[in-house]
């Protein structure tokens, strides 16, 4: 993933996104919290795609994936922020509920 070989960069990016999915599933099966697992998957997958862009890889131009590049830079972080706010809200709600008991 050093911007030299686009095919290798694409394989590494796909592997990292698949690993993010596995981490998300792992968290879901052990915690049973859908929002948490979705947030972990989304954040790690976004990081994987963004790092591919940040190192200057030509994957997005070569395979005509400019839409994925734009999505991972402008829209995906907003989705992750919304998921984080939901997680924070659920955490605060649970803390308040436990303190009332």
Image (spheres, rainbow, N blue to C red):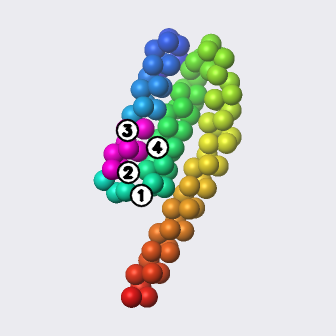
Q: Which residues are magenta?
A: 20-29
Q: Name the residue carrying label 1.
A: 33
Nearest the viewer among 14 and 60 is 14
| Circle nearer the N terminus (1, 4) | 1
Query: Contact, CB < 8 Å: mark 4 with mark 3?
Result: no
Q: Residue at x 38, y 44 (%)?
A: 25
Name the front one of labels 4 and 2: 2
Mark 2, secondary structure of its residue: helix
Residue 64 percent coordinates (x, y) = 66, 17
Name the front one of labels 1 and 4: 1
Compared to 28, does 16 lie above or below?
A: above
| Circle nearer the N terminus (3, 1) | 3
Q: Main secondary structure of the magenta part?
A: helix
Q: Real-space Cα distance between discs 1 and 4?
A: 12 Å
| Circle nearer the N terminus (4, 2) | 2
Q: Real-space Cα distance between discs 4 and 3?
A: 8 Å
Query: Contact, CB < 8 Å: mark 2 with mark 1?
Result: yes
Dot label at residue 28: 2
Q: Residue at x 47, y 25 (%)?
A: 14
Q: Real-space Cα distance between discs 4 and 2?
A: 10 Å
Q: Name the residue carrying label 3.
A: 22
Q: Residue at x 54, y 68 (%)?
A: 89
Mark 1, secondary structure of its residue: loop
């Amino acid at each position: 993933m050093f911007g030299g070989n686009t095919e290798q960069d694409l394989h590494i990016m796909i592997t990292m996104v698949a690993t993010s999915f596995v981490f998300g599933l792992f968290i879901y099966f052990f915690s049973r919290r859908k929002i948490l697992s979705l947030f972990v998957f989304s954040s790690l997958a976004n990081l994987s795609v963004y790092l591919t862009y940040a190192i200057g890889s030509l994957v997005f131009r070569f395979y005509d994936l400019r839409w994925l590049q734009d999505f991972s830079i402008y829209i995906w972080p907003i989705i992750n922020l919304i998921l984080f706010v939901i997680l924070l809200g659920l955490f605060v709600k649970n803390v308040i509920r436990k303190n009332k008991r």
